[in-house]
Image (cartoon, grey):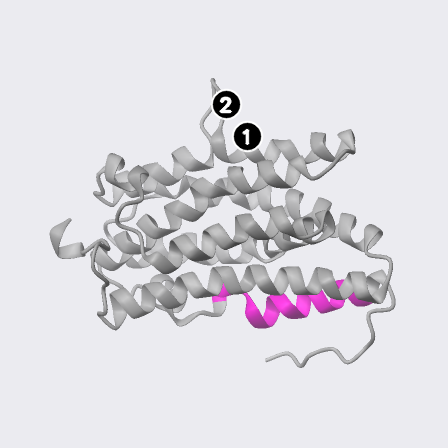
Amino acid sequence: MPTEPNEPLDSPEALERRLRWIGATRYHSLHPFHKLLHGGKLNKGQVQAWALNRYYYQSTIPLKDAVVLSRFRDRQIRLEWRHRIEDHDGSFDSEGGIERWLQLTDGLGLDRAYVESTDGILAATRFAVDAYVHFVRDKTPLEAVASSLTELFAPNLHEERIAGMLQHYDFISPAVMTYFKRRLDQAPRDAEFALNYVMEHARTPAERQAVCGALTFKTDCLWVQQDALYHAYVTGMIPAGAFRPEAA
């Protein structure tokens, strides 16, 4: 486990090193639930539960990005940020990430209307995702941008997920993994812009600390969703009203 940098946040380079340390120690790729998922240790019902709950996060990302966009008077920043909404929502003539996620849940045998209703998701999933939207609404624009920096670490997770799930689960086909394949290109582009933005605009140690706090908050939002899945579908404490695989 990397040790926390002791250097003061007195430069953009020190900020980047601290951000990468946060990702190396707190990103949800480290969670035991992900280890089970990628290692082929879950049954189909547990994978269904993961995809169903993750849909709420995926479908909320364009709402979050619309809020971030609304925080800026700078037209160039809005032009740069708004493609993120289309990446997930799609356009009239092309599918986006939400549609590709629904192709995954279709392939897992989940009813699309049930997935889109979000009726069966865990309360912790809803609370964590909604908290993320509230964060980008209520914090500074700098912190709103910084909270997206988990995308720095996403490509490695997607590569691990694609390889692991295709290797271990006979109910997963390459056709339903297109969401992750597309994000291999999209996430680095988005992360580069956000990283350059915070390194340029976080000019004081206090502002750089706020950027680190925003990324930490985002990793917590992602981590708690894995905690809830593990508690419900590995430990077996499925709360009332939540998806039950045996009833799927």
Residue 27 visible? The answer is yes
Q: Badge 1 is on which residue?
A: 86
161 over 63 or under it: above or below: below
Residue shown at 66% from the left, 42% from the top: 189
Q: In the picture provided, is 67 more to the left or to the right than 54?
A: right
Evaluate if marks 1 and 2 touch, with contact meaning CB atoms under 8 Å apart. Answer: yes
Q: Amino acid at mark 2?
A: Ser
| Residue type, label 1 | Glu
Where is mark 2, residue-wise?
91
Which stretch appears magenta?
14-29
Residue 107 picture location, percent across and down: 26, 41
Is 19 colored magenta in this rendering? Answer: yes
Q: Classify residue 36 as left or right of residue 207.
A: left
Q: Who is closer to the viewer here, 21 or 148? A: 148
Q: Main secondary structure of the magenta part?
A: helix
Left/right of residue 226 with respect to residue 201 in the rendered view: left
Q: Magenta segment: does it hold 60?
A: no
Q: Position of residue 97 (x, y in %)?
A: 46, 37
**Residue at 66% over, 50% down:** 144
